[in-house]
């Protein structure tokens, strides 16, 4: 799979082959996504900034699996809702550029 569209098609077929489409509502997928995101966060709980950047190999592989779960659920949900994630990300970055002009926010973590 080389593109998000390839992934989308593969996930659609994967769910269809298992008769899981009946469970894949946007509501259920959003709930599953947040569970997986929590499992991802769990790997970083109580680590220092430096430790979070230098994970042991075993932990890194576990983090990779949780990130994949989040990515899969997000893509499945986008497919069901007809959202092109690349287009959505582009639009969001354009909004963020206006909301956070580099010359005004450089080096600051303040929320606007």
Image (cartoon, rainbow, N blue to C red):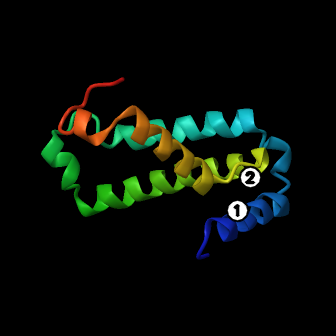
Q: In this orientation, which residue lies closer to the viewer: 83 or 55?
A: 83
Give the structural element (helix, strand or loop) at label 2: helix
Q: Check disc 2: other Cα within 10 Å, few if <14, some if 14-19, many if 20+.
A: some
Circle on res. 49 = none
Assign a secondary structure to mark 1. helix
**Sequence-wise first label, 2 or 1:** 1
Q: Position of residue 73 (x, y in %)?
A: 62, 48
Of 8 and 16, nearer the camera is 8
* Image quarter of residue 54: bottom left
- The spot of residue 1 in percent (x, y) is 61, 75
Residue 92, given in percent of the width and then of the height, sits at: 52, 42
User: Which residue is drawn at the image coordinates 48% and 45% (left, top)?
Assistant: 94
Asked if the residues shown at circle 2 and circle 1 are in contact, with their CB atoms under 8 angstroms apart, the answer is yes
Q: Residue at x 74, y 38 (%)?
A: 26
Q: 32 left or right of 80?
A: left
**Closer to the camera, 13 or 112?**
112
Which numbered marker is on residue 8?
Answer: 1
Q: Residues within 10 Å of mark 1 (few under 14, many from 20)?
A: some
Question: How many angstroms separate mark 2 from mark 1 (CA)?
Answer: 7 Å
Relative height, residue 27 to residue 13 (above, below)? above
Q: Is residue 101 left or right of residue 18?
A: left
The C terminus is located in which quarter?
top left
Q: Residue under circle 2?
A: 79
The residue lying toward the viewer, choosing from 18 and 4, is 4
Tell whether 29 sits left or right of 23.
Answer: left
């Amino acid at each position: 799979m080389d593109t998000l569209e390839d992934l989308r098609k593969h996930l659609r077929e994967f769910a269809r082959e298992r008769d899981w489409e009946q469970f894949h509502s946007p509501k259920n997928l959003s709930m599953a996504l947040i569970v997986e995101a929590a499992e991802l966060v769990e790997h970083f709980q109580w680590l220092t900034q430096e430790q979070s950047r230098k994970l042991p190999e075993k932990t890194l592989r576990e983090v990779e699996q949780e990130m994949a779960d989040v990515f899969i659920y997000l893509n499945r949900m986008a497919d069901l809702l007809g959202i092109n994630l690349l287009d959505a990300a582009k639009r969001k970055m354009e909004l963020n550029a206006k909301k956070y002009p580099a010359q005004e926010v450089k080096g600051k973590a303040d929320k606007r």
